[in-house]
Image (cartoon, rainbow, N blue to C red):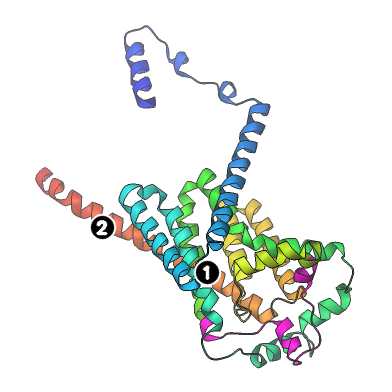
Amino acid sequence: MARARHRQGLSLMADGRLSPEHLEVNPSHLRPHAGLRLLTALFRIARVVALVAGIFATWSLLKRLPLDPNTYNALVLAGSALLVLAVWRFRRDYMPWALLLGGMNLYALLWFYGDQTGWGPFFEYVVRFDRAMGFGELPTVSLQDRLYSPGSVAAHDVGFTVVYMSFFVAPYVAFVSLWFHARPMVDRFVHALLAALFTGLVLIFALPTAPPWMAAEAGLVAPVDRVAHELLAGVNSSVYEETYELAGVNDVAAMPSIHMTVTVVVAVMLARVGGRRGAIPGAAYVLAMGIALVYLGEHYALDVLAGIATGWTGWRASDWLARRTVRTEVADLTISEEPSLRRAA
């Protein structure tokens, strides 16, 4: 349409009915009003919130169906596979949605069985590493001794709990935001996220590791409180217990920290899309999540470091796949153009 209008303008110029000045556009005339920009931004935010809420509501409803676990798992896997096949056949431009939802479903089901491998859980290796980092004392124990007061809720307890819980929405908010504002990065982000998650899943199955609070219950370390769990249960114990049951439980999936893995994937995305303006909040998010995971008693420092490495591995895998895809497309284009080049010669 724009090219047609441009050709029409050139034709009018050639006929002498339009001067070049008429083709010039003043950018200020195209800039929307401040109120309209605000409404547009609010509408985009509302769409993101609605889509993320819809994903979680659908997942919650499926978990409530009166099905035995094997039937439920089979239905989820079959539905995910059918979704990917249908999108591939009819709406390939929506493949990132299908890969994200299908991949997350598969990951969640496999993660749930990570504590049923028949070996573990392991305690000693990670406790020794963290004690070496903490000069003889676990960083979790040191932080809780200085910052946590059982029975009272401090501002930093709430802040670290919010950071910890952001894991459950951050990748979906990031994905939807990319879909609306940086579509070329959507595929790269989904590939990085899934590659990181399944890399972490391999470690979870290979090294089912008990978190600090479980090591404390076994008497291997000093007492450790689950700060976030105690805080959330204190707000509304019935809702918390129901949500915890819906999410599924694998208490020995500490190595690596999937919370940190996903946080790093999101942070690298922010840096790639926003440059320095995205890298600074991304780095702050990684730092806050790392401290929160250790302080809240959910992960060792070694788990956090492994999560950083796993998230970075996901982006390396995504970059490799992108380069391979580009080389394949260039090769296919060269082959398709070869006959016409021969005829031209």
Mark linked to residue 331:
2
The answer to whether 227 is drawn above or below residue 205 in the figure is: above
Query: Is 67 placed left or right of 239 in the picture?
Result: left
The residue shown at (54%, 44%) is 181
Query: Is 266 placed left or right of 297 in the picture?
Result: left
User: Where in the figure is residue 180, as x and y percent of width and height?
Assistant: 52, 44
Rounded to the nearest angstrom, the CA distance separating label 2 from label 1 is: 37 Å
The N terminus - image quarter: top left
**What is the quadrant of residue 4 in the picture?**
top left
Residue topped by disc 1: 108
User: Where in the figure is residue 36, as x and y percent of width and height?
Assistant: 64, 28
The residue shown at (87%, 79%) is 145
Which amino acid type is shown beneath numbered disc 1? Answer: Ala
Q: Residues within 10 Å of mark 2 (few under 14, many from 20)?
A: few
Secondary element under disc 1, as helix, strand or loop, is helix
User: Where in the figure is residue 241, as x and y percent of width and height?
Assistant: 70, 68
Which amino acid type is shown beneath numbered disc 2? Answer: Ala
Magenta-colored span: 205-231
The answer to whether 265 is drawn above or below residue 338 in the figure is: below
Viewer-nearest residue: 305 or 225: 225
The residue shown at (79%, 81%) is 224
**What is the quadrant of residue 121 in the picture?**
bottom right
Q: Earlier in the sequence, mark 2 or mark 1?
A: 1
